[in-house]
Image (spheres, grey):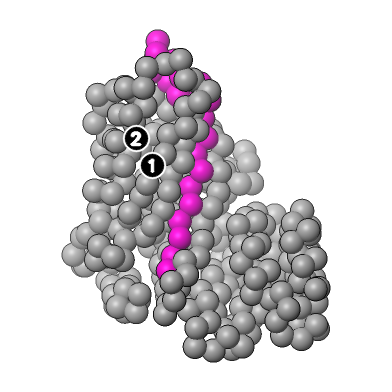
C-alpha cells in the first residue's frame, strides 16, 4: 500500500514517461436471467472478452505491481438480447474498492449503476480499445469506466492525483457522443456518464476531490494508528463535502458518495466522539441525502 502510494506520487506528474502495466483486477459478471432461453455461448464469450480487455489492456502508463492492481467489478444485467442484430440492452453496475493502510479492511471507492448500457456484440468478436477510434459503444463504455476507476483511485492516493486519467474518461465521453447511444450527452441526465466526469473535472467541485483525499489518506489510512485523529480528518472531509454541494448544488456526486458510504460513515461516527460532533455530521449528511435518513439517525445513538 505505502509503496503503491509512493509510486503514484512520483509518477502522476510524469504520466507519459512511466512504464506501462495493467492497472485493474476486474471481475466481470453477466446476469442473463431475463433472457435465459437463449444459448449461453454469446454471453460466455462476452464475459471472457470483457475480462480480457479490462485486465490485459494497459489503460495508462503508470506502473502497478500485481498486488497493487485495483480490485473492481463490472456486473452486467442483460434485459433484452436480439439474435437478429446481435443487440443487447441492459445495465452495468460498476464498483471498485481500495485497501486501507495497515489493516485488512477494504473500502469502496466507487459504486454506481449505469442504467444506459446498450451495445452490439457477436460471439466471436475480438474487443480492442483504440482511443483514437471510438466506434463501438461496448468498448467505449468499458474504457470510460476503466479510466474513471483508475482516476478516482489515484485521487484517494494524492491530491487531485487522478486528473490526467479522468481527462481520458472525459475524452471518451466527448468522442462517444456521436455514436448515438444514451449516457454520453450533456444535460440528458444528472447521473449519466457525461455528468459524472464533467462534475469531477469542474473547478467548482474541487473541494469534492480534496474531500476524497482527506477522507481516505488522512482519515481511513490512519484509523489503525490513531482513531481519534483519523475520525477528525473524516469530519473535516464531511465539511468539504457540504461545501462542494453548496458550490455546485446540481451535482449528484455528493449524493452518490453518501449512498455507497452510508454504512461506513455510520460505523465511523456511531457512538464515537461527542454528541455535538455527531450532530454536526448528522446535519451534513441529512441535508445532502435525506433519502438515507434511516442510516443517519443511527449517528444520534
Quarter of the N terminus within the rendering:
bottom left
The tag earlier along the polypeptide, 1 or 2, is: 1
Coordinates of residue 236 in the picture (x, y in percent): 64, 80
User: Circle 1 is placed at which residue position?
Assistant: 28
User: Circle 2 is placed at which residue position?
Assistant: 47
The tally of labels here is: 2
Q: In the rendered image of this protein, does residue 39 appear above or below residue 235?
A: above
User: Left of 246 or right of it: where is 203?
Assistant: left
The answer to whether residue 130 shows anywhere in this view is no
State the residue lying farthest toward the top. 84
In magenta, the rendered stretch is 79-99
Q: In the rendered image of this protein, does residue 208 appear above or below residue 191?
A: below
The residue drawn where x is 42% and y is 16% is: 38
State the residue lying farthest toward the left. 19
The residue drawn where x is 43% and y is 44% is: 74
Helix, strand or loop under label 2: helix
The residue drawn where x is 28% and y is 75% is: 7
Q: Is residue 126 magenta?
A: no
Amino acid at each position: 500500500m505505502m509503496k503503491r502510494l509512493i509510486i503514484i506520487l512520483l509518477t502522476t506528474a510524469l504520466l507519459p514517461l512511466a512504464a506501462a502495466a495493467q492497472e485493474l483486477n476486474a471481475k466481470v459478471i453477466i446476469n442473463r436471467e431475463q433472457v435465459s432461453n437463449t444459448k449461453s455461448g454469446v454471453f460466455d464469450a462476452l464475459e471472457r472478452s470483457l475480462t480480457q480487455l479490462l485486465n490485459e489492456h494497459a489503460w495508462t502508463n503508470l506502473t502497478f505491481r500485481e498486488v497493487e492492481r485495483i480490485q473492481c467489478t463490472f456486473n452486467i444485467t442483460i434485459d433484452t438480447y436480439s439474435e437478429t442484430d446481435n443487440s443487447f440492452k441492459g445495465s452495468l453496475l460498476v464498483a471498485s474498492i481500495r485497501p486501507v493502510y495497515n489493516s485488512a479492511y477494504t473500502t469502496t471507492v466507487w459504486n454506481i449503476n449505469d442504467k444506459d448500457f446498450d451495445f452490439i456484440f457477436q460471439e466471436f468478436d475480438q474487443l480492442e480499445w483504440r482511443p483514437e477510434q471510438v466506434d463501438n459503444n461496448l468498448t467505449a463504455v468499458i474504457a470510460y469506466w476503466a479510466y474513471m476507476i483508475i482516476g478516482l483511485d489515484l485521487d484517494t492516493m494524492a491530491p487531485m492525483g487522478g486528473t490526467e486519467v479522468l481527462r481520458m474518461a472525459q475524452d471518451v465521453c466527448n468522442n462517444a457522443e456521436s455514436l448515438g447511444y444514451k449516457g454520453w450527452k450533456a444535460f440528458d441526465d444528472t447521473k449519466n456518464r457525461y455528468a459524472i466526469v464533467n462534475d469531477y473535472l469542474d473547478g467548482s467541485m474541487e473541494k469534492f476531490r480534496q474531500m476524497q483525499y482527506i477522507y481516505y489518506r488522512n482519515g481511513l489510512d490512519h484509523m489503525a494508528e490513531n482513531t481519534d485523529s483519523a475520525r477528525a480528518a473524516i469530519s473535516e472531509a464531511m465539511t468539504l463535502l457540504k461545501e462542494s454541494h453548496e458550490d455546485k448544488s446540481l451535482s449528484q456526486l455528493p449524493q452518490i458518495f453518501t449512498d455507497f458510504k452510508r454504512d461506513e460513515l455510520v460505523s465511523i461516527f456511531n457512538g464515537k466522539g461527542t454528541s455535538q460532533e455527531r450532530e454536526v455530521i448528522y446535519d451534513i449528511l441529512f441535508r445532502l441525502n435525506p433519502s438515507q435518513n434511516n442510516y443517519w439517525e443511527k449517528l444520534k445513538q
